Image (cartoon, rainbow, N blue to C red):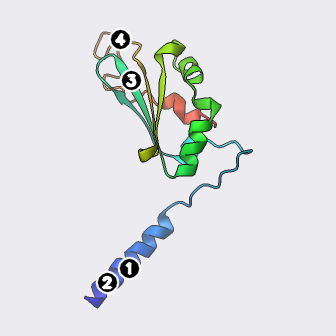
């Protein structure tokens, strides 16, 4: 049992050493979304709606993203060639997440649709600077 506990403790130490440190965030420095978000993904919410999910490592990153002018409906609408009134940005504090909802340009599965699942639509978000 002692040997097993020592192995488990060593594994925890190794995991902590491999885990990246939390980013240091100052309000005056530009921060890339990819540096503070744990997950940036897209997926369908039905055949006509696309969602983007932004999940953050910590509350500081989440608050920074929520306050950023780079994640407003107007900016995202321009990025995705959508009308501003069709883009919703929905912060969800209990999960440290932001969901962005907009219509798909092409209905899922229609001729010309190159991403039936909507899983490749998060690309523009990877270049966002907050």
Question: Which residue is found at the position 29% from the left and 21% from the top?
Answer: 46
* Sequence-earlier tag: 4 or 3: 3
Query: Which secondary structure, mark 4?
Result: loop
The residue indicated by pointer 1 is: 9
Q: Nearer the viewer, mark 4 or mark 2?
A: 2
**Residue 60 point in image, percent of width and height:** 58, 50
The residue indicated by pointer 4 is: 112
Q: Would residue 77 appear left or right of 7 to someone viewing this image?
A: right
Q: CA distance from mark 1 to mark 2?
A: 6 Å
Location of the N terminus (image quadrant): bottom left
Q: CA distance from mark 4 to mark 3?
A: 16 Å
* Sequence-earlier tag: 4 or 1: 1
Query: Which secondary structure, mark 2?
Result: helix
Q: Residues within 10 Å of mark 3 (few under 14, many from 20)?
A: many
Q: CA distance from mark 4 to mark 2?
A: 57 Å
C-beta proximity under 8 Å, tags 3 and 2: no
The residue indicated by pointer 3 is: 50
The residue indicated by pointer 2 is: 5
**Residue lying farthest to the top in this orientation:** 111
Q: Nearer the viewer, mark 4 or mark 1?
A: 1
C-beta proximity under 8 Å, tags 1 and 2: yes
Q: CA distance from mark 4 to mark 1?
A: 53 Å
């Amino acid at each position: 049992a002692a040997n097993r506990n020592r192995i488990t403790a060593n594994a925890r130490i190794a995991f902590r050493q491999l885990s990246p440190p939390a980013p240091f965030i100052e309000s005056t420095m530009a921060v890339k979304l990819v540096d503070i978000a744990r997950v940036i993904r897209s997926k369908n919410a039905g055949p006509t709606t696309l969602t983007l999910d932004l999940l953050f490592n910590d509350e500081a990153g989440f608050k920074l993203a929520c306050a950023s002018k780079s994640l407003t409906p107007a900016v995202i609408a321009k990025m995705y060639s959508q009308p501003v009134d069709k883009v919703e940005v929905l912060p969800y504090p209990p999960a440290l997440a932001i969901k962005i909802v907009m219509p798909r340009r092409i209905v899922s599965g229609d001729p010309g649709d190159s991403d039936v699942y909507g899983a490749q639509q998060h690309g523009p978000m990877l270049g966002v600077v907050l």
